[in-house]
Image (cartoon, grey):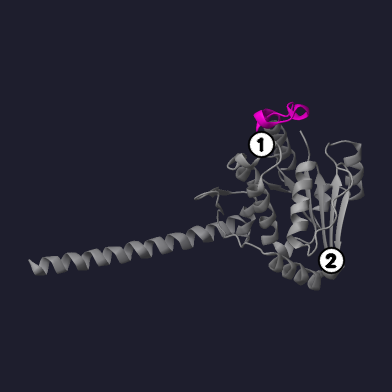
Amino acid sequence: MLFIEELNLYANAKIAKWLATGFVIFFIFYHGFLHIYDGGDSCQRLLSDGRFQGSLVWQPYGCMIHSYSKIDTRRCMRYVAFLKESNTIAFVGDSRIRQLYHSFVDQVAMNHPPKPTKAHMDINYNDSNLFLNFDFFWRPNLDQSFLHLLNNWKTLNHLGNTTRVLWMLQDPVVPERLSKDKVAITNEQIDFYNKAAMEILRGSKVLLWSSSRLIAQGSLIGFVDGIHAGSVTVNYDTQFDYNDCDRLEAVALHHQEP
């Protein structure tokens, strides 16, 4: 009887080892596949795929998020400045992109810069110690003003040869919280707009940023006015790009109101 129990224990231990080895081999091949699929940069998935695990804790597929403090952020910006002598980032779009611009500045600025005197205006932040220059261009619509700015940069696809260009998909809205001047904006319009952007930019050098939309869909409680993202979404958006700090020196974010 004792012999049989010892034999069962031995067999169970063997099976456990085989299973553990199998799981390790599976994850090696799985992450190897992700590495090949993403062209050697699995953390591209910061901008595309992931899921919430636990209470509003976002986990991208294939990589981990480092939570950058202000000190971490400035250290990384200083490193980029040392290598490239330039840290230039342009934000182009509406009040949602302006919200992201302010979050980027707050993450790196030692002293909060004064808020702009008007809501609808271009904004600039400069830190000479870090060779850092952030520009926000108020372009809420795809009109002549937007095209004029784009012509100065040639085209988005041409710009993508030398600059990392991100097109941020529109987050959903919470209709019942929208003010009277925003009630015409519907999630159906936003879905149509996002679909058009994805079709037009497919195959170009412009990277589609879709993970923000996924996070927003899971944290709509933070959309106090129904249209602007809460702190959960904005903080993750900011951290995502600073997690790719070494390629952050020339990012253009485009995002228009539908």
Q: Quadrant of residue 188?
A: top right
Q: Is residue 180 magenta?
A: yes
Position above or below: 25 against 191:
below
Question: In the image, which residues are magenta?
Answer: 172-189
Q: Amino acid at mark 2?
A: Ser
According to the picture, the residue beneath numbered tag 1 turns out to be 172
Residue 173, image x, y percentages: 67, 34
Is 179 within the magenta? Answer: yes
Residue 110: x and y, percent? 78, 65
Front residue (pair 39, 107): 107
Residue 87 vertical position relative to residue 178 in the rendered view, above or below? below
Q: Secondary structure at mark 1?
A: loop
Give the foreground label among 1 and 2: 1
**Circle 1 residues within 10 Å: few <14, some 14–19, many ≥20:** many
Mark yes or no: residue 205 visible. Answer: no
Give me the residue at 66% from left, 39% from top.
223
Residue that appears at 65% across and 42% down? 213
| Nearer to me, 183 or 140 | 183
Write down the residue under mark 2: 86
| Category of crowding for the residue at label 2, using alpha-carbon neighbours closer than 10 angstroms: few (below 14), some (14–19), many (at least 20) | some
Q: Residue at x 27, y 63 (%)?
A: 15
Is 82 displayed left or right of 223 in the figure?
right
Inter-mark Cα distance, 1 to 2: 34 Å
**On-image quarter of the C terminus:** top right
For residue 162, which quarter of the picture?
Answer: bottom right
Q: Residue drawn at (73%, 70%), measured in percent from left and top? A: 75
